[in-house]
Every structure is written in structure tokens, then in C-alpha cells.
Image (tube, helix red, strand yellow):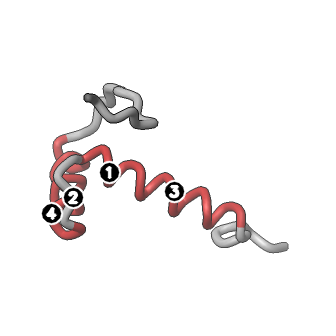
């Protein structure tokens, strides 16, 4: 019996340096897949935008 997940498959084109960093972050965080690193980065960025971090005040 397969378990349903809320996942979608995408393809992204990145530089060799970005791939190296994604693989390094996956290893540091203990993730098996680079997609989880992408999820984490996007989630953190969206939270920072919602709380007003990173916005210019002026």
C-alpha cells in the first residue's frame, strides 16, 4: 500500500557551485535528498518575508 504525500517532482538547473552547496547543506542537516534542502530554504525565506525581516525601512 503506497502512502500519499504532498510532493511534486520538479527539475531545476543550477550551477556546479550551487549544487555543491545544496549537497553540503543536505549532509549537514542529515537530509537524504536535495529537495528537502530546497523546501527548508524556501520555507525560511517565506517566514522571513512575512515577519518583515530583510525589508528595507525608510
Q: Is residue 12 left or right of residue 19?
A: right
- Where disc 2 sits, the SS reads loop
Do the numbered discs 2 and 3 sit on residues whose CB atoms are within 8 Å?
A: no
* Mark-to-mark CA distance, 2 and 4: 6 Å
> Looking at the image, which is closer to me, 29 or 49?
29
Q: Which residue carries the number 3 mark?
A: 43
Q: Quadrant of the C terminus?
A: bottom right
Q: Is residue 10 above or below residue 40?
A: above
Q: Which residue carries the number 2 mark?
A: 31
Q: Which residue carries the number 1 mark?
A: 36
* Mark-to-mark CA distance, 4 and 1: 11 Å
> Looking at the image, which is closer to me, 30 or 20?
30
Q: Position of residue 47 (x, y in %)?
A: 61, 63
Q: Residue at x 15, y 63 (%)?
A: 27
* Of callouts 4 and 1, the N-terminal one: 4
* Mark-to-mark CA distance, 2 and 1: 7 Å
> Would you identify the image quadrant in which residue 3 lies?
top left
Do the numbered discs 2 and 4 sit on residues whose CB atoms are within 8 Å?
A: yes
Q: Quadrant of the N terminus?
A: top left
- Where disc 4 sits, the SS reads helix
* Of callouts 3 and 4, the N-terminal one: 4
* Of callouts 2 and 1, the N-terminal one: 2
Q: Residue at x 73, y 69 (%)?
A: 52
Q: Which residue carries the number 4 mark?
A: 27
> Looking at the image, which is closer to me, 49 or 43?
43
Amino acid at each position: 500500500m503506497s502512502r500519499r504525500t504532498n510532493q511534486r517532482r520538479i527539475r531545476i538547473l543550477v550551477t556546479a557551485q550551487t549544487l555543491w552547496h545544496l549537497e553540503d547543506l543536505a549532509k549537514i542537516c542529515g537530509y537524504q535528498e536535495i529537495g528537502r534542502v530546497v523546501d527548508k530554504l524556501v520555507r525560511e525565506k517565506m517566514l522571513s518575508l512575512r515577519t518583515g525581516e530583510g525589508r528595507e525601512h525608510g
